[in-house]
Amino acid sequence: MPNATPRRRMGLVERERQILDGAIEFFAVQGFGGQLRDLAKSIGVTHALLYHYFPTKQDLLDRVYLEVFEGRWRAEWDALLDDTQLDIEDKLVAFYLEYVNITLSKEFVRILVFSGLTDHAITDRFFSMLRARLFPRLIRETRRFRGVMSRAKASKRETELLMGLHGGFFYISMRRWIYTQDVYSESSLDVYSEHLVRDRVHAYLLASRELFALKTPLKELVRKRQCPASPAKTLATTTTEETT
């Protein structure tokens, strides 16, 4: 009987990579309540070996965060969004086309949702990065698109409009990876198409026109809509306009 081929011994870097990849898949499926003993079993390593590479569960979660979230941010995206020579709509489309296809993977979406449902540790870190690196650039570019040079802090309405754009892309991936629904794509099931991205960017920039054209305070507009002029006052106004 021929001798069995001996199993190749993994190096330190290779073994750590195996554990990290296994942990990302494990947390994406089980959430953060899963036990490390179960993780070790699913990877095919001993519990003791797992602790040799990651002494605590938090150490492992920190590496998962860096790998799945911060590690997928591209430095060239900063330069792209800062380029004043590019058309703003094309610039946002180029950014989000890469962002949704590189960043919003199954593991990213499911781990972020699990974090939001538990301790918020990963969601807080990730949104802190977005507030520092992405959102101010998008607000600046939206204002520039509308000819507004203000550097004031974004209003709540600006912020909510922007969250509609950014969150809309995340929801597309939630439909795919949480609800297991089909998402339209012209090229393949694994790639979000440019038309899908451009439609949302275009709608966002159209909505920004009304935001920056608004002269009357929003509260005043709401009050006027809730308290329409009386018929007599409307008739008097109409009569005056007809005689002038």
Image (spheres, rainbow, N blue to C red):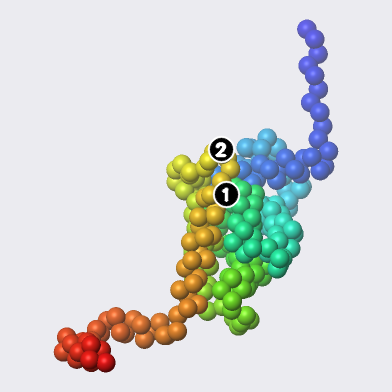
Q: Is residue 3 above or below residue 237?
A: above
Q: What element carries label 2?
A: loop
Q: What residue type is labelled 2?
A: Ser
Q: Percent x, y for residue 75?
A: 74, 59
Q: Which of 136 and 57 is in front in this view?
A: 136
Query: Which residue is label 2 attached to?
Result: 188
How far is the residue under mark 2 from the one under mark 1?
A: 12 Å
Instruction: Determine if residue 153 is in view.
Output: yes
- Residue at the (76%, 44%) spot, across then down: 16
Q: Residue at x 56, y 38 (%)?
A: 188
Mark 2 vs mark 1, foreground winner is 1
Q: Do the residues labelled 2 and 1 touch (CB within 8 Å)?
A: no
Residue 119 is at least partly visible in this image: no
Viewer-closest of 19 and 171? 171
Which residue is depicted at the point 51% across and 45% down?
177
Residue 66 lies in quadrant: bottom right
User: Closer to the camera, 162 or 89?
Assistant: 89
Q: Say which mark, if any, is on residue 194.
A: 1
Q: Residue furthest front?
A: 244
Q: Decide: is 142 above or below 80.
A: below
**Which amino acid lies under the numbered mark 1 shown in the image of this protein?**
Glu
Q: Residue 50 location in percent, x, y?
A: 72, 45
Note whether 140 is above or below 165 in the view shown.
Answer: below
Q: How crowded is mark 1: few (under 14 residues within 10 Å), some or many (20 or more)?
A: some
Q: Going 81% across and 28% down the picture, which residue do you hit?
A: 8
Q: x%, y% of residue 15?
A: 77, 40
Position of 213 with respect to 240 (left or right) is right
